[in-house]
Image: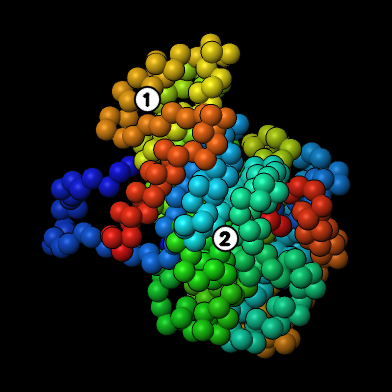
Amino acid sequence: MDLAALMLADSRFPGGGHVHSGGLEEAVARKAVTDLPSLHRFLIGRLRTAGALGAVFAAAATRGRFAELDVELDARTPSPAQRAASRMQGRGIARAARKAWPSETLAELLRTTPEPHHPIIVGALVGEPRAAAQVVAYHSVTGPATGAIRLLGLDPFGVNAIIARLAPDLESVVAQAEKDADTAPADLPAPSAPGLDLLAEAHDRHHREEVRLFVS
Amino acid sequence: MSADHVHPVNFDPTDPGHDPHDHDHHHGAVRIGIGGPVGSGKTALTAALCRALGDSVNLAVVTNDIYTTEDADFLRKSGVLDVDRIEAVQTGACPHTAIRDDITANLDAVERLEHRFPGLELVIIESGGDNLTAVFSRGLVERQIFVVDVAGGDKVPRKGGPGVTTADLLVINKTDLAPMVGADLVVMTADAHRMRGELPVISQSLVETPDAPAVAEWVRAQLRTLATVR
């Protein structure tokens, strides 16, 4: 894995990811996640749906075709709140990337889509399908996992062990994404999780009514 | 954290030696951060500055609430500023990360305000209440004010931490409460000056001077200085 991929995967990377919980905050508010076992189930579900979709698009974005991928990922993300969260994180990564990794590829991506989707800019920056898919699949679970530590006060060693136990699921998601790197954008898979879509929309609604600590 | 010029020390033996000044010049509004512990009076000071400066300075505010939109709501309801000029960001349960380690959400908010109000001169960024180590990144603000209050105990300045020792201005707030909470203002002020060397300290009570005249004058001086630098 090259340095750019390691930096992007690092929770210390200043790309704005720390304010997103991937639906976990709303799940906690509804008592759907309360402890380590329920967090584990949430993370597996997120990894195999939203994580798999992001990984596929990150791998595909290593081959360019940014405009097509952008609309295809929009079409596979029915929740407006999730589309907004993905673009907000993509924009945050872009701000850091313009300084860290200026390149013609990045310039082309930002000309095509000034607010790129998170998986697509990761693919553009990492450039290698497997590593790009790993970063995005990993991101899909680390945000909610640290969110659970902050919101529920869960044991960090327990949460860390849960992430480690996701290795086989992560590998199968990444392997599928690698296979699809050269697939035409319109033919890419579209794994979905209506539950996560609904949580994202509810989070957005509730933020206007009461209080949410995270943006998504 | 004042920008005193010192000769750079080079730790890189392979460096051929070139000018290390590689600064980005930021051309938008001047950005001033207000940080400090929970309940020290950050929002009240922000509101006071809006009242004192709002007529003469084109300004806007970003709030970083920890758990509520209380601060933004308070500012909106207090009528000190047009509601469009107040942006609230969510900090993901980590207020110091949002002002120091990953300033993305705050920069997004500043850029939204600059886009909405061309010619914006000043953005006040109010931190969520945090601990004595929580300071703003220089990538987010050009000057920062750290607010402590006498009710938090007169030992706070001597405890130090980056907020007390390095902020461009330390404000000791709620001085009117000192007799009620048994805080010794003389000790507090002396400790503050001892910890901060040449850096300024202002003691104030917004009960006695609701428009924070001394802090407002300090802010105006910073605006003049920074405007000539740009």
Residue shown at 57%/70% (left/top)?
A: B116
Type of the residue with mark 1: Ala
Query: Which of marks 2 and 1 precedes in the sequence?
Result: 2
Query: In the rendered image, which quarter is residue A179 located in?
Result: bottom right
Q: Position of residue B33 (x, y in %)?
A: 47, 47
Q: Position of residue A210 (x, y in %)?
A: 80, 48
Residue labelled with disc 2: B109
Q: Nearer the viewer, residue B71 or B209?
A: B209
Residue shown at 47%/78% (left/top)?
A: A106
Q: Is residue A176 above or below residue A33?
A: below
- Determine the secondary structure under disc 1: helix
Q: Nearer the viewer, residue B164 or A79?
A: B164
Density class for disc 2 (Cα within 10 Å; few <14, some 14-19, many ≥20) is some
Residue labelled with disc 1: B192
Q: Are discs 1 and 2 both within one chain?
A: yes
Q: Nearer the viewer, residue B132 or B190?
A: B190
Query: Does the residue at mark 1 contact the one at mark 2 (Cβ under 8 Å)?
Result: no
Q: Position of residue B67 (x, y in %)?
A: 69, 42
Residue, far top: B182
